[in-house]
Image (cartoon, helix red, strand yellow):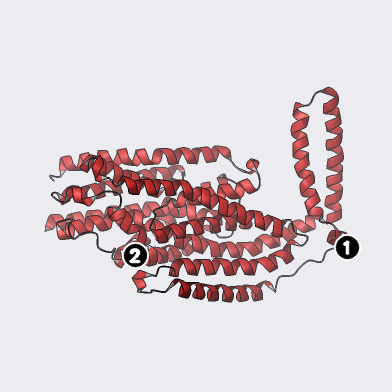
Amino acid sequence: MELDLIMMILVLVVGFYMAWNIGANDVSNAMGTSVGSGALSLKKAIIVAAVLEFAGAFLLGSNVSETMQNGIVDPTHFMDNPSVFIIGMLSALLATSLWLQLASYFGWPVSTTHAIVGALVGFGIVGGGFSAIHWQEIGSIALSWLISPVLSGIFSFIIFSILQRKVLYALNPTYASKKLVPILAGIVLSTFTMSILLGGVHNLKIELSSLQSLGLALVVGWITYLIAKILVRRIHIPETGELYNKYNLSQQLFSLNKSLKHLQKAHLVAESDTKNEVSSILNSIRILSASLQEKSGYHKRHSEYETVEKLFSFLQILSACYVAFAHGANDVSNAIGPVAAALDAIKYKSLNNSFQSVPTWLLAFGGVGIVIGLATWGWRVIQTIGKKITELTPTRGFSAEFGAAITILVASKMGLPISTTHCIVGSVLGVGLAKGLSALNLRTVREIVLSWVITIPSAAIACMLIFYLVTAIVPT
């Protein structure tokens, strides 16, 4: 009995350590865009994450946790010796936690999901052989890892491209923002509500049909739209001169600056007479650009763009809440799934009765660990996501967060343990690409991709070593 109690405590401690590391690394990915754009301070981001991550973990966390419990390693291979299964789950949690702490120290936004799946595969191979792994499930998960960053990137690219066209390049950006922000706020909240209700919230025993979920989501979206519309009325719309109303000088300036970049490249490779001609054209365009800036009140418009970004910072706070909830729903399973499986095996001393639904107190336990991890060590990875991949503003940050959140929550409802890291980084890349390849820090992108590639084998090897070490000490 005493050994069982010790094992339970050990599993819970290592599970909490794992949840702490998820907070330090993965939640930082989720909140990094908001902090990087200036929409939220680090302190406020932690408060938002504390509430929404916990809510997501508690309300929807069980969907993916069940996949992590018995979807990777086949427990029937360990029926005769449950202690091997318990040690394996413990080894997987510890190996993943150590790898995540190392990655967080260097500021690498690695995938927690990659790490825990890699570790579980490592345990399955050494503990039960290749046949102990559900390879078909692994194939589905691996496919979701490839699809999720692409989908997130596409969503975010489309969202930001629409914002560029409809707001940032509009004749009157403030007026365009006042029209668009309430609509977007309604869409965010209705999507958020729909994604929570669709399929039911089992922990609260809420079961609604698809039509009821859609109806309630539309009501929430409509109320949000009306409230946002009332709030944005207070914002002053700057008056514009006749010339400015007639011609969209900002579009002309944008095109001129674009042509300047191309001409500068041509000037570098041109020879003699051609170089002189290109140089002359460059000077003419620079003079024209300066003249247009003066006519259009460029510097006045710059302050107008600050008003636009301030408007979108409120919208980004909404999308940050969405991302935090989605992350809690999906990634708490990385810590809680193996913990639930090990605790059930200890409790029943057999794998026959294991893998019941994940208890709500365990989901809450994981949610607390995640929040503490963000609060104590999250700032390292927040810097990478928020500042080092591409420059983020509230409009870009909102586009990245909303695109990622849609992908993450859809996957959570399907029970797919996708990588939140992939979704966030894919979204930030999508937004950066909307501004052109030069807007990306390709060196940082290369380092991130490399850390992703080595995560799975690193976690698998670490798990194998820990498993061998523990089984050499503890008789099974």
Q: Disc 2 residue type?
A: Ala
Q: Which residue is mark 2?
A: 364
The x, y position of residue 136, in whole percent, is 33, 47
Instruction: Name above or below for residue 130 compared with residue 307.
Output: above
Say which residue appears at 52% left-offset and 51% top-offset.
Answer: 151
Would residue 159 appear left or right of 137 to someone viewing this image? right
Viewer-proximal residue among 466 and 6: 466
Instruction: Name above or below for residue 232 compared with residue 68.
Output: below
The x, y position of residue 97, in whole percent, is 34, 48
Q: Which residue is mark 1?
A: 242
Viewer-proximal residue among 168 and 158: 158
Q: Is residue 377 visible?
A: no
Q: Quarter of the image holding residue 12? A: bottom left
Which badge, 2 or 1, is on the more N-terminal residue? Answer: 1
Give SS at disc 2.
Answer: helix
Q: Disc 1 residue type?
A: Glu
Label 1: how many Cα within 10 Å (few below 14, some 14–19, many 20+): few
The x, y position of residue 127, in whole percent, is 21, 42
Say which residue appears at 50% left-offset and 38% top-offset.
Answer: 447
Q: Is residue 148 visible?
A: yes
Would residue 128 appear left or right of 296 to someone viewing this image? left
Figure quadrant of the N terminus: bottom left
Q: Quarter of the image holding residue 210? A: bottom left
Label 2: how many Cα within 10 Å (few below 14, some 14–19, many 20+): many
Instruction: Name above or below for residue 467 compared with residue 34.
Output: above
